[in-house]
Image (cartoon, rainbow, N blue to C red):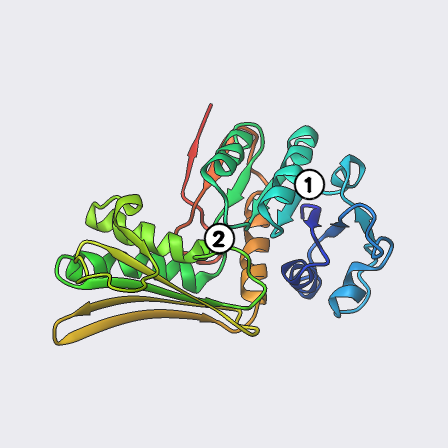
Amino acid sequence: MPAIGIFGANGRMGRSLVSVAKEQQLNLTAATVRDGSELIGVDAGELAGCGKVNVPLTATAAESVSKADIWVDFTMPEPMLAHLRLAVAAKKAMVIGVTGLTDAQYKQVQQAAEQIPIVWAPNMSVGVNLLLHLVQTAAKVMGQTADIEIIEAHHRFKKDAPSGTAMAIGASIAKALDRDLAKVAVYGREGMTGEREQQTIGFATVRGGDIIGDHTALFADLGERLEITHKASSRSTFAQGALRAALWLQNKTQRQILFHRKILQKAVRISSFHKN
């Protein structure tokens, strides 16, 4: 079993990853927090509320990165890129669930994937990855006449909008309809907007309370509408998917580029291509 490390183990997803790793008896060997944190030295499991796991929180540094084979990161774009540089230097694989990346940041992940195995996905849950498949089928059947809207809701603390999952849903639909999402996406409406253009794909964002993550793809035609919805009730579903991805990376070699997602079954299956 590979040695697994968690960047940002004090965050909401970090703590969930620690709890799931303990529950599934995975080989958790390292958990980090930012340098200077008052949490350094605290047992990661006790912080997560799942009981002691005998893994003290350490500052994120080259020395701590050497303590695991595969690292999982659900932090934020800038810290994640710093973690990625450490992983590349140490030749460690990474599972990345960070969203809100700019094109330039995403390119850095792609470049790093030429040197280490990486799994990146906007959402690690089985249900969401199934939804990404279902919306393509719906788009092919209804997309030429129906108005398409994507509605997403998350907790008040989420910093990026629309969510990475909402953008992935939009990209899946646009691909099925042979549309350029960058040209047809509409992010919010206000004032006298005029009649809706049928080719557009709309995004609506809700932020409030402790909503884990709700996503709906709406196909609205005259006389009927189809709604495909996924609602997450626990962060553990994302943690479970990310840790499956970590185990899946165990035997992958360097210079493999592993991006995006397909339907998750017994393991997280990420559509991949290889560079030799």
Could you tell me if the residues under marks 1 and 2 are in contact, i.e. CB atoms within 8 Å? no
Query: What type is the residue that disc 1 sits on?
Result: Asp
Q: Secondary structure at mark 1?
A: loop
Q: Residue at x 65, y 45 (%)?
A: 71
Query: What type is the residue that disc 2 sits on?
Result: Val
Q: Is residue 105 left or right of residue 26?
A: left
Q: What is the residue that sits farthest to the right in this orientation?
A: 41
Q: Give the number of marks.
A: 2
Q: Alpha-carbon neighbours of circle 1 within 10 Å: few (<14), some, or many (≥20)?
A: many
Is residue 105 visible in the rendered structure shown here?
yes
Please tell me which residue lies in front, 252 or 236: 236
Task: Check residue 98 in the rendering and tell me which mark sits there, or answer none.
Answer: none
Residue 35 position, x and y percent, is: 80, 45
Q: What is the residue that sits farthest to the front in this orientation?
A: 192
Residue 9 position, x and y percent, is: 71, 55
Q: Residue at x 56, y 47 (%)?
A: 96
Q: Secondary structure at mark 2?
A: loop
Residue 64 position, x and y percent, is: 78, 41
Q: Which residue is mark 2?
A: 268
Please tell me which residue lies in front, 93 or 106: 106
Q: Which residue is mark 1?
A: 69
Q: Residue at x 55, y 57 (%)?
A: 159
Is residue 264 visible in the rendered structure shown here?
no
Task: Write down the quadrant of residue 187 in the picture.
Answer: bottom left
Task: Write down the quadrant of residue 88 in the picture.
Answer: top right
Against 81, residue 228 (above or below) is below
Residue 221 position, x and y percent, is: 15, 69
Cα separation between marks 1 and 2: 18 Å
Q: Alpha-carbon neighbours of circle 2 within 10 Å: few (<14), some, or many (≥20)?
A: many
Looking at the image, is mark 1 or mark 2 earlier in the sequence? 1
